[in-house]
Image (cartoon, helix red, strand yellow):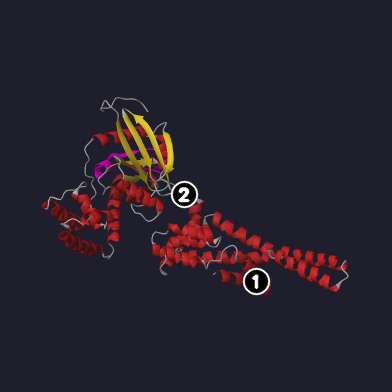
Amino acid sequence: MSEQVLACPVTAQHIKVALVGQPNVGKSMLINSVSNAHLHVGNFSGVTVDKAEVLFDYKGYNFTVVDLPGTYAFTDYTIEERVTHDYLCAEEYDIIINVVDSTNLLKNLQLTSELLTMSKKVVVALNMSDEAQKEGIVVDAEYMSELMGLPCIKVSAATKMGIEKLIEAVVQEFINEKKEPKLVFSVSVEDEISNIVSYFKKHKFQAVNTYRNIAINLLKNNKRTYGKLHDNPIWTELQPILIEASKHIELHHDTDDIKEAFAEEYGAFNRGIVAEVVTKKKQQQQKTLTEKIDSVLIHPIAGIPMFLFFMWGLFQLTFEIGAIPMDYIDGFFGWFGDIVGATISNESVRSLVVDGIIAGVGAVVLFIPNIVILFIGIALLESTGYMSRVAFLLDGFFHKFGLHGQSFIPLVTGFGCSIPAYMSARVLKNDRDRLLTLFIIGFMSCGARLPVYVLFAGAFFPEDMAGNVLFAIYI
Protein backbone atom coordinates (compact mmCIF):
# COMPACT_ATOMS: atom_id res chain seq x y z
CA MET A 1 0.00 0.00 0.00
CA SER A 2 1.28 3.48 -0.75
CA GLU A 3 1.47 5.91 2.15
CA GLN A 4 -0.24 9.00 0.72
CA VAL A 5 -1.41 11.47 3.36
CA LEU A 6 -5.12 11.34 4.12
CA ALA A 7 -6.94 13.54 6.63
CA CYS A 8 -7.03 11.28 9.65
CA PRO A 9 -6.54 11.47 13.40
CA VAL A 10 -3.06 11.58 14.87
CA THR A 11 -3.69 8.55 17.05
CA ALA A 12 -4.51 5.33 15.20
CA GLN A 13 -8.20 4.42 15.06
CA HIS A 14 -9.56 0.92 14.75
CA ILE A 15 -11.95 0.02 11.90
CA LYS A 16 -13.69 -3.32 12.08
CA VAL A 17 -15.07 -4.54 8.75
CA ALA A 18 -17.50 -7.39 8.06
CA LEU A 19 -16.81 -8.95 4.65
CA VAL A 20 -20.11 -10.23 3.26
CA GLY A 21 -21.10 -11.79 -0.05
CA GLN A 22 -22.69 -14.71 -1.80
CA PRO A 23 -20.67 -17.93 -2.23
CA ASN A 24 -18.00 -17.93 -4.96
CA VAL A 25 -17.74 -14.15 -5.42
CA GLY A 26 -14.03 -14.03 -4.49
CA LYS A 27 -14.23 -12.91 -0.85
CA SER A 28 -11.34 -15.11 0.28
CA MET A 29 -9.13 -13.92 -2.57
CA LEU A 30 -10.07 -10.31 -1.85
CA ILE A 31 -9.21 -10.62 1.83
CA ASN A 32 -5.76 -11.89 0.82
CA SER A 33 -5.28 -9.03 -1.65
CA VAL A 34 -5.94 -6.10 0.68
CA SER A 35 -2.35 -6.16 2.00
CA ASN A 36 0.38 -8.41 3.33
CA ALA A 37 -2.12 -9.42 5.98
CA HIS A 38 -1.83 -11.55 9.07
CA LEU A 39 -4.49 -14.21 8.58
CA HIS A 40 -6.09 -15.72 11.69
CA VAL A 41 -8.36 -18.74 11.16
CA GLY A 42 -10.67 -20.00 13.91
CA ASN A 43 -14.24 -21.07 14.58
CA PHE A 44 -17.30 -19.00 15.32
CA SER A 45 -18.54 -19.59 18.84
CA GLY A 46 -20.67 -22.72 19.15
CA VAL A 47 -20.26 -23.89 15.53
CA THR A 48 -17.62 -25.56 13.38
CA VAL A 49 -17.83 -22.97 10.60
CA ASP A 50 -14.43 -21.38 9.97
CA LYS A 51 -13.86 -17.67 10.23
CA ALA A 52 -10.88 -15.76 8.86
CA GLU A 53 -9.68 -12.44 10.25
CA VAL A 54 -7.16 -10.13 8.59
CA LEU A 55 -5.31 -7.47 10.57
CA PHE A 56 -3.43 -4.66 8.83
CA ASP A 57 -2.55 -0.97 9.16
CA TYR A 58 -3.31 1.70 6.59
CA LYS A 59 -2.64 5.44 6.91
CA GLY A 60 -2.96 5.57 10.66
CA TYR A 61 -5.90 3.17 10.84
CA ASN A 62 -5.88 -0.34 12.30
CA PHE A 63 -8.11 -2.64 10.22
CA THR A 64 -9.72 -5.90 11.28
CA VAL A 65 -11.56 -7.61 8.43
CA VAL A 66 -13.79 -10.58 9.32
CA ASP A 67 -14.57 -12.88 6.38
CA LEU A 68 -18.11 -14.18 6.98
CA PRO A 69 -19.47 -17.39 5.39
CA GLY A 70 -21.11 -16.93 1.98
CA THR A 71 -24.88 -16.53 1.97
CA TYR A 72 -27.26 -16.05 -0.97
CA ALA A 73 -29.73 -13.97 1.04
CA PHE A 74 -30.04 -12.42 4.50
CA THR A 75 -31.66 -15.55 5.98
CA ASP A 76 -30.80 -18.10 8.68
CA TYR A 77 -31.74 -21.49 7.19
CA THR A 78 -28.33 -23.20 6.98
CA ILE A 79 -25.55 -23.05 9.59
CA GLU A 80 -23.45 -20.77 7.37
CA GLU A 81 -26.36 -18.39 6.75
CA ARG A 82 -27.20 -18.36 10.46
CA VAL A 83 -23.61 -17.49 11.41
CA THR A 84 -23.53 -14.57 8.95
CA HIS A 85 -27.02 -13.38 9.91
CA ASP A 86 -26.34 -13.52 13.68
CA TYR A 87 -22.94 -11.82 13.33
CA LEU A 88 -24.35 -8.92 11.30
CA CYS A 89 -27.27 -8.48 13.71
CA ALA A 90 -25.55 -8.95 17.07
CA GLU A 91 -21.80 -8.25 16.81
CA GLU A 92 -19.98 -4.91 16.93
CA TYR A 93 -18.40 -3.70 13.68
CA ASP A 94 -18.14 -0.43 11.80
CA ILE A 95 -18.65 -1.11 8.10
CA ILE A 96 -19.88 -3.87 5.80
CA ILE A 97 -17.92 -4.57 2.61
CA ASN A 98 -20.39 -6.34 0.35
CA VAL A 99 -18.49 -8.27 -2.34
CA VAL A 100 -20.49 -8.86 -5.52
CA ASP A 101 -19.71 -10.63 -8.80
CA SER A 102 -19.69 -8.01 -11.56
CA THR A 103 -20.43 -10.68 -14.18
CA ASN A 104 -23.69 -11.65 -12.43
CA LEU A 105 -24.80 -8.42 -10.79
CA LEU A 106 -28.56 -9.02 -10.73
CA LYS A 107 -28.27 -12.22 -8.70
CA ASN A 108 -25.71 -10.73 -6.28
CA LEU A 109 -27.76 -7.58 -5.59
CA GLN A 110 -30.36 -9.76 -3.84
CA LEU A 111 -28.13 -9.81 -0.75
CA THR A 112 -27.00 -6.20 -1.23
CA SER A 113 -30.52 -4.79 -1.22
CA GLU A 114 -31.32 -6.69 1.98
CA LEU A 115 -28.18 -5.34 3.68
CA LEU A 116 -29.40 -1.81 2.94
CA THR A 117 -32.20 -2.29 5.49
CA MET A 118 -29.60 -2.46 8.28
CA SER A 119 -28.40 0.63 10.13
CA LYS A 120 -24.81 0.05 9.06
CA LYS A 121 -22.46 1.73 6.62
CA VAL A 122 -22.02 -0.36 3.46
CA VAL A 123 -19.37 -0.28 0.73
CA VAL A 124 -19.97 -2.41 -2.38
CA ALA A 125 -16.91 -4.08 -3.94
CA LEU A 126 -17.66 -4.86 -7.60
CA ASN A 127 -15.29 -7.82 -7.81
CA MET A 128 -14.25 -9.68 -11.00
CA SER A 129 -14.35 -6.41 -12.95
CA ASP A 130 -11.60 -7.76 -15.22
CA GLU A 131 -13.73 -10.82 -16.05
CA ALA A 132 -16.74 -8.59 -16.73
CA GLN A 133 -14.65 -6.54 -19.14
CA LYS A 134 -13.59 -9.69 -21.02
CA GLU A 135 -17.27 -10.66 -21.36
CA GLY A 136 -18.16 -7.21 -22.69
CA ILE A 137 -20.05 -6.19 -19.51
CA VAL A 138 -19.65 -2.53 -18.52
CA VAL A 139 -20.76 -1.43 -15.03
CA ASP A 140 -21.05 2.32 -14.37
CA ALA A 141 -19.80 2.27 -10.76
CA GLU A 142 -20.16 6.05 -10.23
CA TYR A 143 -23.79 6.11 -11.37
CA MET A 144 -24.48 2.99 -9.31
CA SER A 145 -23.05 4.77 -6.22
CA GLU A 146 -25.35 7.71 -6.91
CA LEU A 147 -28.45 5.53 -7.39
CA MET A 148 -27.86 3.39 -4.28
CA GLY A 149 -26.51 6.13 -2.01
CA LEU A 150 -23.33 4.25 -1.07
CA PRO A 151 -19.81 3.77 -2.49
CA CYS A 152 -19.53 1.16 -5.27
CA ILE A 153 -15.92 0.41 -6.22
CA LYS A 154 -14.66 -1.68 -9.13
CA VAL A 155 -12.05 -4.21 -7.97
CA SER A 156 -10.37 -7.41 -9.05
CA ALA A 157 -9.03 -9.65 -6.32
CA ALA A 158 -7.09 -11.67 -8.91
CA THR A 159 -5.16 -8.71 -10.38
CA LYS A 160 -5.37 -6.48 -7.24
CA MET A 161 -6.99 -3.74 -9.34
CA GLY A 162 -8.88 -1.13 -7.30
CA ILE A 163 -7.89 -2.59 -3.91
CA GLU A 164 -6.38 0.65 -2.63
CA LYS A 165 -9.37 2.64 -3.88
CA LEU A 166 -11.63 0.24 -1.97
CA ILE A 167 -9.71 0.77 1.28
CA GLU A 168 -9.80 4.55 0.69
CA ALA A 169 -13.58 4.35 0.28
CA VAL A 170 -13.90 2.36 3.54
CA VAL A 171 -11.82 4.95 5.42
CA GLN A 172 -13.82 7.83 3.94
CA GLU A 173 -17.11 6.12 4.76
CA PHE A 174 -15.87 5.56 8.33
CA ILE A 175 -15.06 9.26 8.71
CA ASN A 176 -18.31 10.52 7.15
CA GLU A 177 -21.70 10.59 8.81
CA LYS A 178 -23.95 7.69 7.87
CA LYS A 179 -26.32 8.47 5.00
CA GLU A 180 -29.62 6.72 4.39
CA PRO A 181 -29.23 4.37 1.38
CA LYS A 182 -31.61 4.91 -1.53
CA LEU A 183 -33.60 1.68 -1.24
CA VAL A 184 -36.98 2.48 -2.79
CA PHE A 185 -39.98 0.15 -2.79
CA SER A 186 -43.33 0.24 -4.60
CA VAL A 187 -46.00 2.80 -3.67
CA SER A 188 -47.97 0.35 -1.50
CA VAL A 189 -44.93 -0.61 0.59
CA GLU A 190 -43.65 2.98 0.86
CA ASP A 191 -47.09 4.10 2.07
CA GLU A 192 -47.06 1.53 4.87
CA ILE A 193 -43.47 2.41 5.82
CA SER A 194 -44.50 6.08 6.04
CA ASN A 195 -47.47 5.18 8.30
CA ILE A 196 -45.26 3.26 10.72
CA VAL A 197 -42.55 5.96 10.70
CA SER A 198 -45.21 8.61 11.44
CA TYR A 199 -46.46 6.51 14.35
CA PHE A 200 -42.93 6.28 15.83
CA LYS A 201 -42.42 10.04 15.40
CA LYS A 202 -45.76 10.77 17.04
CA HIS A 203 -44.80 8.73 20.11
CA LYS A 204 -41.15 9.93 20.03
CA PHE A 205 -39.97 6.32 20.15
CA GLN A 206 -36.35 5.93 21.28
CA ALA A 207 -34.36 3.59 19.01
CA VAL A 208 -30.80 2.93 17.85
CA ASN A 209 -31.87 2.17 14.27
CA THR A 210 -33.68 4.64 12.04
CA TYR A 211 -37.48 4.56 12.06
CA ARG A 212 -37.45 3.54 8.39
CA ASN A 213 -35.24 0.50 9.08
CA ILE A 214 -37.43 -0.57 12.00
CA ALA A 215 -40.54 -0.19 9.83
CA ILE A 216 -39.07 -2.33 7.02
CA ASN A 217 -37.99 -5.04 9.47
CA LEU A 218 -41.45 -5.07 11.07
CA LEU A 219 -43.13 -5.44 7.67
CA LYS A 220 -40.72 -8.28 6.82
CA ASN A 221 -41.66 -10.05 10.09
CA ASN A 222 -38.14 -9.81 11.47
CA LYS A 223 -38.14 -11.82 14.72
CA ARG A 224 -35.48 -9.72 16.47
CA THR A 225 -37.33 -6.46 15.81
CA TYR A 226 -40.62 -7.97 16.94
CA GLY A 227 -38.96 -9.32 20.09
CA LYS A 228 -37.60 -5.89 21.05
CA LEU A 229 -40.93 -4.12 20.52
CA HIS A 230 -43.26 -6.79 21.89
CA ASP A 231 -42.83 -5.76 25.53
CA ASN A 232 -43.04 -2.03 24.80
CA PRO A 233 -46.32 -0.24 25.74
CA ILE A 234 -46.74 1.05 22.16
CA TRP A 235 -47.09 -2.54 20.91
CA THR A 236 -50.85 -2.68 21.62
CA GLU A 237 -51.45 0.18 19.16
CA LEU A 238 -48.73 -0.84 16.72
CA GLN A 239 -49.89 -4.43 16.18
CA PRO A 240 -53.20 -3.58 14.40
CA ILE A 241 -51.29 -1.13 12.14
CA LEU A 242 -48.88 -3.93 11.15
CA ILE A 243 -51.70 -6.40 10.47
CA GLU A 244 -53.43 -3.93 8.14
CA ALA A 245 -50.12 -3.07 6.50
CA SER A 246 -49.39 -6.74 5.74
CA LYS A 247 -52.86 -7.22 4.23
CA HIS A 248 -52.41 -4.12 2.06
CA ILE A 249 -48.99 -5.24 0.76
CA GLU A 250 -50.12 -8.83 0.14
CA LEU A 251 -53.18 -7.57 -1.74
CA HIS A 252 -51.03 -5.51 -4.11
CA HIS A 253 -48.66 -8.45 -4.71
CA ASP A 254 -51.37 -11.09 -5.14
CA THR A 255 -49.84 -13.34 -2.46
CA ASP A 256 -50.53 -14.35 1.14
CA ASP A 257 -46.82 -14.58 1.96
CA ILE A 258 -45.15 -11.31 2.99
CA LYS A 259 -41.71 -12.82 2.28
CA GLU A 260 -42.68 -13.43 -1.35
CA ALA A 261 -43.98 -9.87 -1.57
CA PHE A 262 -40.66 -8.44 -0.35
CA ALA A 263 -38.72 -10.81 -2.61
CA GLU A 264 -40.61 -9.23 -5.53
CA GLU A 265 -39.85 -5.76 -4.15
CA TYR A 266 -36.12 -6.45 -3.88
CA GLY A 267 -36.12 -8.07 -7.31
CA ALA A 268 -37.78 -5.02 -8.88
CA PHE A 269 -35.29 -2.67 -7.20
CA ASN A 270 -32.34 -4.79 -8.34
CA ARG A 271 -33.59 -5.01 -11.92
CA GLY A 272 -33.95 -1.24 -11.97
CA ILE A 273 -30.35 -0.74 -10.80
CA VAL A 274 -28.97 -3.24 -13.31
CA ALA A 275 -30.97 -1.71 -16.16
CA GLU A 276 -29.48 1.71 -15.38
CA VAL A 277 -25.83 0.86 -14.72
CA VAL A 278 -25.03 -2.29 -16.75
CA THR A 279 -24.50 -2.32 -20.48
CA LYS A 280 -23.30 -5.27 -22.52
CA LYS A 281 -21.29 -4.80 -25.67
CA LYS A 282 -22.50 -6.83 -28.60
CA GLN A 283 -19.97 -9.50 -29.36
CA GLN A 284 -19.95 -11.81 -32.31
CA GLN A 285 -19.59 -14.80 -30.09
CA GLN A 286 -20.69 -18.21 -31.20
CA LYS A 287 -22.19 -20.67 -28.79
CA THR A 288 -19.68 -22.99 -27.18
CA LEU A 289 -20.01 -26.74 -27.64
CA THR A 290 -21.22 -27.06 -24.02
CA GLU A 291 -23.96 -24.45 -24.61
CA LYS A 292 -25.07 -26.23 -27.78
CA ILE A 293 -25.29 -29.58 -25.97
CA ASP A 294 -27.10 -27.98 -23.00
CA SER A 295 -29.73 -26.47 -25.29
CA VAL A 296 -30.67 -30.04 -26.20
CA LEU A 297 -30.13 -31.91 -22.91
CA ILE A 298 -32.05 -29.45 -20.71
CA HIS A 299 -34.80 -28.76 -23.21
CA PRO A 300 -38.03 -28.26 -21.21
CA ILE A 301 -39.97 -30.85 -23.27
CA ALA A 302 -37.40 -33.26 -24.71
CA GLY A 303 -35.05 -33.17 -21.69
CA ILE A 304 -36.79 -35.71 -19.43
CA PRO A 305 -37.52 -38.32 -22.17
CA MET A 306 -33.87 -37.95 -23.20
CA PHE A 307 -32.73 -38.60 -19.62
CA LEU A 308 -34.90 -41.74 -19.45
CA PHE A 309 -33.50 -42.86 -22.82
CA PHE A 310 -29.91 -42.46 -21.58
CA MET A 311 -30.66 -44.49 -18.44
CA TRP A 312 -32.41 -47.20 -20.50
CA GLY A 313 -29.48 -47.28 -22.93
CA LEU A 314 -27.02 -47.60 -20.05
CA PHE A 315 -28.86 -50.62 -18.64
CA GLN A 316 -29.11 -52.23 -22.07
CA LEU A 317 -25.36 -51.77 -22.63
CA THR A 318 -24.71 -53.21 -19.18
CA PHE A 319 -26.11 -56.59 -20.21
CA GLU A 320 -25.27 -56.54 -23.93
CA ILE A 321 -21.59 -55.71 -23.46
CA GLY A 322 -21.43 -57.60 -20.17
CA ALA A 323 -22.58 -60.78 -21.93
CA ILE A 324 -19.26 -61.00 -23.84
CA PRO A 325 -16.96 -61.55 -20.81
CA MET A 326 -19.72 -63.52 -19.05
CA ASP A 327 -19.40 -66.35 -21.61
CA TYR A 328 -15.64 -66.57 -21.00
CA ILE A 329 -16.06 -66.46 -17.20
CA ASP A 330 -18.77 -69.15 -17.33
CA GLY A 331 -16.57 -71.35 -19.52
CA PHE A 332 -13.55 -70.85 -17.25
CA PHE A 333 -15.40 -71.90 -14.08
CA GLY A 334 -16.96 -74.88 -15.92
CA TRP A 335 -13.49 -75.98 -17.06
CA PHE A 336 -12.00 -75.37 -13.62
CA GLY A 337 -14.80 -77.41 -11.97
CA ASP A 338 -14.18 -80.34 -14.32
CA ILE A 339 -10.42 -80.28 -13.59
CA VAL A 340 -10.88 -80.16 -9.82
CA GLY A 341 -13.76 -82.70 -9.87
CA ALA A 342 -11.61 -85.25 -11.66
CA THR A 343 -9.13 -85.27 -8.75
CA ILE A 344 -11.78 -85.94 -6.04
CA SER A 345 -13.05 -89.52 -5.74
CA ASN A 346 -15.63 -88.97 -2.97
CA GLU A 347 -18.99 -88.05 -4.55
CA SER A 348 -20.22 -85.88 -1.63
CA VAL A 349 -16.97 -83.92 -1.30
CA ARG A 350 -16.76 -83.47 -5.11
CA SER A 351 -20.34 -82.15 -5.17
CA LEU A 352 -19.58 -79.74 -2.31
CA VAL A 353 -16.42 -78.35 -3.96
CA VAL A 354 -17.53 -78.37 -7.62
CA ASP A 355 -21.27 -77.65 -7.44
CA GLY A 356 -21.14 -75.66 -4.21
CA ILE A 357 -17.94 -73.64 -3.83
CA ILE A 358 -16.68 -73.30 -7.44
CA ALA A 359 -20.10 -72.96 -9.08
CA GLY A 360 -21.30 -70.59 -6.30
CA VAL A 361 -18.28 -68.30 -6.59
CA GLY A 362 -18.56 -68.49 -10.39
CA ALA A 363 -22.23 -67.43 -10.27
CA VAL A 364 -21.28 -64.27 -8.32
CA VAL A 365 -18.13 -63.47 -10.35
CA LEU A 366 -20.19 -63.97 -13.51
CA PHE A 367 -22.02 -60.66 -12.92
CA ILE A 368 -18.95 -58.54 -12.04
CA PRO A 369 -18.60 -57.25 -15.66
CA ASN A 370 -22.23 -56.04 -15.56
CA ILE A 371 -21.66 -54.25 -12.25
CA VAL A 372 -18.41 -52.65 -13.45
CA ILE A 373 -20.00 -51.41 -16.70
CA LEU A 374 -23.00 -49.99 -14.79
CA PHE A 375 -20.84 -48.13 -12.28
CA ILE A 376 -18.58 -46.71 -15.00
CA GLY A 377 -21.66 -45.48 -16.91
CA ILE A 378 -23.19 -43.75 -13.87
CA ALA A 379 -19.80 -42.23 -12.95
CA LEU A 380 -19.52 -40.80 -16.48
CA LEU A 381 -22.98 -39.23 -16.25
CA GLU A 382 -22.07 -37.60 -12.93
CA SER A 383 -18.56 -36.44 -13.87
CA THR A 384 -19.76 -34.79 -17.10
CA GLY A 385 -22.25 -32.72 -15.09
CA TYR A 386 -25.28 -34.34 -16.70
CA MET A 387 -26.83 -35.29 -13.34
CA SER A 388 -26.69 -31.66 -12.12
CA ARG A 389 -28.45 -30.60 -15.33
CA VAL A 390 -31.16 -33.18 -14.65
CA ALA A 391 -31.62 -31.59 -11.21
CA PHE A 392 -32.38 -28.27 -12.93
CA LEU A 393 -34.67 -30.04 -15.39
CA LEU A 394 -36.73 -31.81 -12.72
CA ASP A 395 -37.32 -28.77 -10.50
CA GLY A 396 -40.84 -28.13 -11.82
CA PHE A 397 -41.65 -31.86 -11.79
CA PHE A 398 -40.65 -32.15 -8.13
CA HIS A 399 -42.80 -29.17 -7.16
CA LYS A 400 -45.89 -31.12 -8.27
CA PHE A 401 -45.14 -33.67 -5.55
CA GLY A 402 -44.60 -31.04 -2.88
CA LEU A 403 -40.81 -31.27 -3.10
CA HIS A 404 -38.22 -28.61 -3.86
CA GLY A 405 -36.05 -28.99 -6.97
CA GLN A 406 -33.03 -29.03 -4.68
CA SER A 407 -34.32 -32.36 -3.32
CA PHE A 408 -33.00 -33.96 -6.50
CA ILE A 409 -29.39 -33.47 -5.35
CA PRO A 410 -29.64 -35.65 -2.19
CA LEU A 411 -31.93 -38.11 -4.00
CA VAL A 412 -29.45 -38.57 -6.86
CA THR A 413 -26.66 -38.84 -4.28
CA GLY A 414 -28.74 -41.64 -2.76
CA PHE A 415 -28.15 -43.67 -5.92
CA GLY A 416 -24.47 -43.69 -4.95
CA CYS A 417 -24.74 -44.07 -1.17
CA SER A 418 -27.49 -43.19 1.29
CA ILE A 419 -25.15 -41.81 4.00
CA PRO A 420 -23.84 -38.76 2.05
CA ALA A 421 -27.37 -38.38 0.65
CA TYR A 422 -28.76 -37.90 4.17
CA MET A 423 -25.98 -35.41 4.91
CA SER A 424 -26.54 -33.44 1.69
CA ALA A 425 -30.21 -32.90 2.60
CA ARG A 426 -29.01 -30.00 4.79
CA VAL A 427 -28.98 -27.80 1.66
CA LEU A 428 -32.78 -27.70 1.77
CA LYS A 429 -34.08 -24.54 3.37
CA ASN A 430 -37.02 -25.61 5.52
CA ASP A 431 -37.76 -28.51 7.85
CA ARG A 432 -40.67 -29.87 5.81
CA ASP A 433 -38.60 -30.26 2.62
CA ARG A 434 -35.72 -31.77 4.59
CA LEU A 435 -37.91 -34.36 6.36
CA LEU A 436 -39.73 -35.37 3.17
CA THR A 437 -36.46 -35.81 1.34
CA LEU A 438 -34.88 -37.76 4.22
CA PHE A 439 -37.80 -40.22 4.22
CA ILE A 440 -37.64 -40.70 0.44
CA ILE A 441 -33.87 -41.27 0.31
CA GLY A 442 -34.42 -44.74 1.78
CA PHE A 443 -36.26 -45.76 -1.41
CA MET A 444 -33.38 -44.75 -3.69
CA SER A 445 -31.41 -47.57 -5.35
CA CYS A 446 -28.01 -47.01 -3.74
CA GLY A 447 -24.78 -48.60 -4.94
CA ALA A 448 -25.19 -51.55 -2.56
CA ARG A 449 -28.56 -52.45 -4.09
CA LEU A 450 -27.62 -52.22 -7.77
CA PRO A 451 -25.48 -55.40 -7.73
CA VAL A 452 -28.46 -57.25 -6.23
CA TYR A 453 -30.71 -55.92 -8.99
CA VAL A 454 -28.15 -56.98 -11.59
CA LEU A 455 -27.92 -60.46 -10.08
CA PHE A 456 -31.69 -60.97 -10.01
CA ALA A 457 -32.25 -59.48 -13.48
CA GLY A 458 -29.48 -61.62 -14.97
CA ALA A 459 -30.44 -64.80 -13.11
CA PHE A 460 -34.20 -64.78 -13.74
CA PHE A 461 -34.53 -63.08 -17.13
CA PRO A 462 -32.92 -63.67 -20.55
CA GLU A 463 -30.29 -61.22 -21.79
CA ASP A 464 -32.65 -59.46 -24.21
CA MET A 465 -35.06 -58.67 -21.31
CA ALA A 466 -32.61 -58.15 -18.41
CA GLY A 467 -31.80 -54.55 -19.36
CA ASN A 468 -35.48 -53.58 -19.51
CA VAL A 469 -36.18 -55.29 -16.16
CA LEU A 470 -33.27 -53.43 -14.47
CA PHE A 471 -34.52 -50.15 -16.00
CA ALA A 472 -38.03 -50.81 -14.61
CA ILE A 473 -36.64 -51.50 -11.12
CA TYR A 474 -34.52 -48.35 -11.29
CA ILE A 475 -37.48 -46.19 -12.33
> Which of 299 and 181 lies nearest the eye of the viewer?
181
Residue sitting at 42 percent across and 49 percent down? 47
Based on the displayed image, in which of its 4 quarters is residue 266 positioned?
Answer: bottom left
Q: Is the residue 175 above or below the residue 442 in the image?
A: above
Residue tagged by mark 2?
286
**Amino acid type, callout 2:** Gln
Inspect the magenta stretch and tell me whether residue 114 lies in it.
no
In the rendered structure, find residue 205 and report the number of the disc placed on it.
Answer: none
Task: Nearest to the eye among marks 2 and 1: give it.
Answer: 1
Q: Residue furthest left?
A: 202
Q: Position of residue 244 (x, y in %)?
A: 18, 63
Inspect the magenta stretch and tell me whether residue 137 lies in it.
yes
> Which of 377 and 91 lies nearest the eye of the viewer?
91
Q: Residues within 10 Å of mark 2 (few under 14, many from 20)?
A: few
Whether residue 73 is visible, yes or no, is yes
Q: Which quadrant holds the C terminus?
A: bottom right
Query: Is residue 60 toward the left or the right of residue 347 in the image?
Result: left
Magenta segment boundaries in residue numbering: 130-156
Query: Is residue 164 toward the left or the right of residue 415 in the image?
Result: left
Query: Is residue 270 toward the left or the right of residue 456 in the image?
Result: left
> Who comes first in sequence, dot 2 or dot 1?
2
**Amino acid type, callout 1:** Phe
- Asked which secondary structure carries label 1, the reply is helix
Q: Position of residue 460 (x, y in %)?
A: 67, 74
- In three-dimensional space, the C-alpha distance between marks 2 and 1, rounded to whole angstroms, equals 49 Å
> Which of 327 and 88 lies nearest the eye of the viewer?
88
Give the total number of marks visible in the rendering: 2
Q: Position of residue 252 (x, y in %)?
A: 23, 63
Q: Which quadrant holds the N terminus?
A: top left
Residue tagged by mark 1?
456
> Which of 278 and 312 lies nearest the eye of the viewer?
312
Whether residue 275 is visible, yes or no, is no
